[in-house]
């Protein structure tokens, strides 16, 4: 019967991994732990087909696939093999799954199922996630330039995600455009890649080599071994500026020159800032006259963007704008105009303010209604 059906069964450790072959596609069936997928029971028999490489990284690959059982939908499959190199770099994929199992938010990549494939010498972690077509770097590479509305819309969703992460007691520690995925047609954003995320413990020491350089907060560049949510706030502000400007805000080739550039922009940190960052005085020359944040912006940049960055890019981590206050900033006021603003694809932006009594509905989105449909009131709202 197996030969007639052309079914091949692989055994990984004690778990059967069934691969169904047909002329057009290869299907994989296995029992995985249910995380945020709808249904009942702790585990579920799932089936994947048409798996194609979507993105590759140093320690993991991401595939796009069709989930055909227990329901039909497009999913992303993050597959990571444990290796000595990954362990040495501190990459823990079980940790990523554990973090995502605590986070349920429309602007955070949703972990549907989790599966551990164990063999004699290796272990592979499978994370089946919601699928969004592109990250922001790939979107830009396709020649897509965000206008002011989309820049604000995506930034708002990013800050909404950061607020949720911190409310659950975690730090992301690698917020950057490459870790932001979108469905640009729908105007939906999700923050992804929680491989570096950590549970926040005040005063706990860590390696300061955190966050990609262009988005790294000054306390990390100065060598702080203890840090706070402020490192994510700095990174999110830099990404917001990038969405609005179409270019990296602060970009240097090395950590040392990145640090020096920040000092030339903001000036040398005051003694109170040094104490707040919990670092030693940086041994660099003091600029006679700081360039100031306005020097980083374009002539036609909205004044609200400068105001936002002046509230965000501060030496003192505690003084930086919090996600809750960021979401109320004047930069995002155009998203709440009446009627709602139109995106380039003629869909209406639809966002609402957070509802403190409905934690699971936090998020933001844009609708798919066209200008011609305005009379029909087909705009769909999603709470943020």
Image: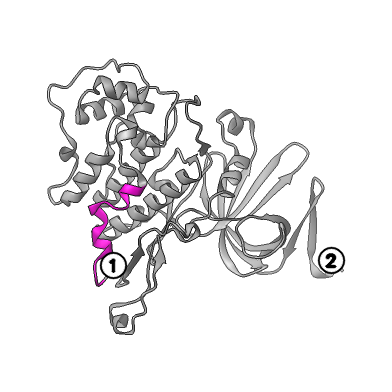
Q: Position of residue 13 (x, y in %)?
A: 80, 45
Compared to 102, does 296 lie above or below? above
Place of residue 111 in the rendered image (x, y in percent of width and height, measured from the top left) = 58, 54
User: As displayed, is residue 60 above or below residue 333?
Assistant: above
The quadrant the N terminus occupies is: bottom right
Tell whether 206 sits left or right of 116: left
- Give the structural element (helix, strand or loop) at label 2: helix
The mark found on residue 208 in the picture is: none
**Residue 343, numbered circle:** 1
Magenta stretch: residue 371 in it? no
Q: Nearer the viewer, residue 150 or 68?
A: 150
Report whether residue 149 is seen: yes
Residue 3 numbered tag? 2
Front one among 293 and 226: 226
326 in magenta = yes
Q: Residues within 10 Å of mark 2 (few under 14, many from 20)?
A: few
């Amino acid at each position: 019967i197996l030969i007639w059906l052309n079914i091949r069964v692989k055994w990984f450790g004690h778990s059967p991994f069934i691969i169904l072959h047909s002329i057009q596609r290869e299907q994989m069936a296995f029992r995985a732990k249910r995380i945020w997928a709808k249904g009942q029971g702790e585990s579920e028999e799932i089936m994947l087909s048409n798996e194609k490489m979507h993105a590759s990284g140093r320690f993991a690959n991401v595939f796009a696939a069709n989930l055909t059982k227990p329901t039909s939908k497009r999913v992303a499959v993050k597959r990571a093999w444990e290796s000595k190199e990954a362990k040495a770099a501190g990459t823990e994929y079980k940790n990523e799954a554990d973090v995502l199992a605590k986070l349920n938010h429309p602007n955070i990549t949703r972990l549907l199922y989790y599966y551990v494939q164990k063999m004699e010498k290796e272990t592979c972690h499978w994370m089946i996630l919601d699928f969004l077509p592109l990250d922001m770097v790939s979107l830009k590479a396709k020649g897509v330039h965000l206008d002011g509305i989309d820049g604000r819309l995506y930034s708002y969703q990013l800050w909404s995600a950061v607020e949720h992460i911190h409310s659950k007691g975690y730090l992301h520690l690698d917020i950057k455009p490459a870790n932001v995925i979108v469905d640009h047609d729908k105007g939906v954003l999700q923050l992804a890649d929680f491989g570096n995320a950590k549970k926040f413990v005040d005063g706990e020491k860590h390696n300061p080599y955190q966050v990609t350089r262009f988005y790294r907060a000054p306390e990390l560049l100065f060598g702080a071994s203890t840090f706070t949510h402020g490192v994510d706030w700095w990174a999110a502000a830099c990404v917001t500026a990038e969405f609005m400007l179409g270019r990296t805000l602060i970009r240097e080739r090395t950590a040392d020159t990145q640090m020096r550039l920040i000092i030339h922009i903001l000036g040398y940190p005051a003694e109170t800032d040094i104490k707040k960052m919990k670092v030693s005085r940086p041994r660099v020359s003091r600029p006679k006259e700081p360039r100031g944040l306005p020097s980083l912006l374009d002539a036609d940049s909205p004044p609200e963007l400068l105001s936002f960055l002046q509230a965000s890019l501060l030496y003192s981590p505690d003084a930086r704008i919090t996600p809750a206050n960021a979401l109320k900033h004047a930069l995002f006021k155009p998203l709440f105009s009446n009627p709602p603003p139109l995106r380039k694809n003629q869909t209406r932006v639809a966002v609402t303010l957070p509802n403190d009594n409905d934690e699971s509905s936090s998020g933001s989105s844009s609708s798919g209604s066209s200008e011609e449909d305005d009379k029909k009131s087909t705009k769909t709202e999603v709470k943020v």
